[in-house]
């Protein structure tokens, strides 16, 4: 029996890349990379605007090959000026482009680029809060690492949900579990994020985030019939439809934090003095409290 598809309806999925390399390159299942590669190989798009890390700082570029998509960054917990990319897209000879960004970025892109005769697919990443650049420097300092010693960074390297990893020129590295530096969301939050309520990227065609009930999977929110067809046609993605209540329940704690405007920036010095094992313990206690109280 063919499934009925309604226009402008929302559809809820979890998914991951079928290709192991693509999956391992992603923060949670590699679904965004897999979809971009599929769209590129099927000529649905000619290129994609992606973000990568140049040293310690994020930059953006329009990529046109699967290899370049694979080399784009995973999650980047750092606020940066993305507006120069508006000119890149506007002046590009490409007419069919996918744009990957955070909810606030997608909102600006869509308003600014809507007047141009280009077909753009907007892909948003779920966003609880973003951080000032000082948060990255604080992490390096806590690890007793000088910025000049850093070859590259990865905010979500490793198994499971990953963690902050510093790579050095001598091929050594330092790793901190993600839970151990979640305090940065409270102490180094960008002021603009305090007034933002858009967690799911409401202006995007398809939005992606972590799946908290199935590791190494992405949560996928699709808006509209045409976008659902694009997703379901991607044979390089393993997809499972999920119940709406389960879909939204898994992110409830992050959405509530976003709404709360909780800001502990005045306590950043205190948090910065605590060792990572203590911060990890506090995070676990906080999760237990949220679950049972």
Image: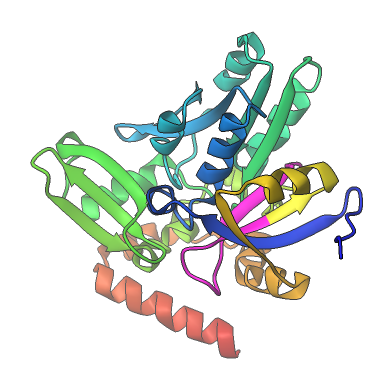
Question: Residue 61 in the image: x percent, y percent?
Answer: 49, 23
Q: Residue at x 86, y 65 (%)?
A: 1
**Depth order, front residue of 244/226:** 226
Task: Please tell me whether residue 215 belongs to the stretch shown in magenta.
Answer: yes
Q: Residue at x 47, y 47 (%)?
A: 131
Q: In the figure, is residue 274 to the left or right of 131?
A: left
Position of residue 242 relative to residue 201, above or below, is below
Q: In the figure, is residue 215 to the left or right of 57?
A: right
For residue 53, which quarter of the picture?
top left
Question: Residue 287 in the image: x percent, y percent?
Answer: 49, 80
Q: Is residue 114 visible?
A: yes
Work out which residue is located at the far left of the displayed protein and give it: 170
For residue 2, which quarter of the picture?
bottom right
**Depth order, front residue of 68/162:** 68
Work out which residue is located at the far front of the displayed protein and give it: 1
Q: Is residue 77 visible?
A: no
Question: Residue 8 in the image: x percent, y percent?
Answer: 88, 48
Quadrant including the C terminus: bottom right
**Depth order, front residue of 16/165:** 16
Q: In the figure, is residue 230 to the left or right of 57?
A: right
Question: Residue 264 in the image: x percent, y percent?
Answer: 49, 61
> Magenta span covers which residues?
203-220
**Depth order, front residue of 227/282:** 227
Position of residue 185 relative to residue 147, above or below, is below
């Amino acid at each position: 029996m063919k499934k009925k598809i309604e226009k402008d309806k929302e559809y809820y999925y979890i998914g991951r890349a079928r290709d192991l390399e693509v999956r391992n390159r992603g923060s949670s299942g590699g679904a965004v990379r897999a979809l971009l590669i599929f769209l590129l190989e099927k000529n649905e798009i000619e290129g994609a605007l992606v973000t990568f890390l140049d040293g310690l700082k994020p930059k953006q570029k329009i990529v046109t090959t699967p290899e370049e998509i694979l080399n784009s960054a995973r999650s980047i917990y750092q606020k940066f000026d993305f507006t120069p990319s508006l000119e890149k897209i506007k002046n590009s000879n490409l007419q069919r482009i996918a744009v990957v960004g955070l909810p606030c970025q997608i909102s600006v892109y869509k308003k600014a680029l809507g007047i141009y005769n280009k077909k753009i697919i907007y892909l948003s990443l779920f966003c609880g809060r973003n951080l000032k650049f000082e948060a990255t420097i604080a992490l390096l300092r806590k690890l007793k690492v000088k910025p000049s010693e850093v070859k590259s960074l990865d905010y979500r390297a490793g198994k499971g949900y990953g963690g902050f990893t510093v790579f050095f020129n001598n091929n050594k590295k330092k790793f901190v579990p993600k839970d151990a530096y979640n305090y940065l969301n409270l102490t180094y939050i960008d002021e603009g994020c305090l007034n933002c309520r858009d967690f799911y990227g409401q202006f995007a065609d398809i939005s992606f985030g972590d799946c908290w009930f199935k590791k190494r999977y992405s949560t996928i929110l699709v808006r509209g019939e045409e976008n659902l067809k694009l997703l379901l046609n991607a044979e390089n993605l393993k997809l499972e439809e999920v119940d709406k209540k389960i879909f939204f329940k898994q992110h409830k704690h992050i959405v509530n934090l976003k709404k709360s405007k909780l800001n502990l920036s005045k306590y950043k010095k205190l948090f910065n003095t605590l060792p990572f094992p203590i911060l990890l313990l506090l995070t676990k206690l906080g999760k237990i409290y949220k679950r049972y109280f």
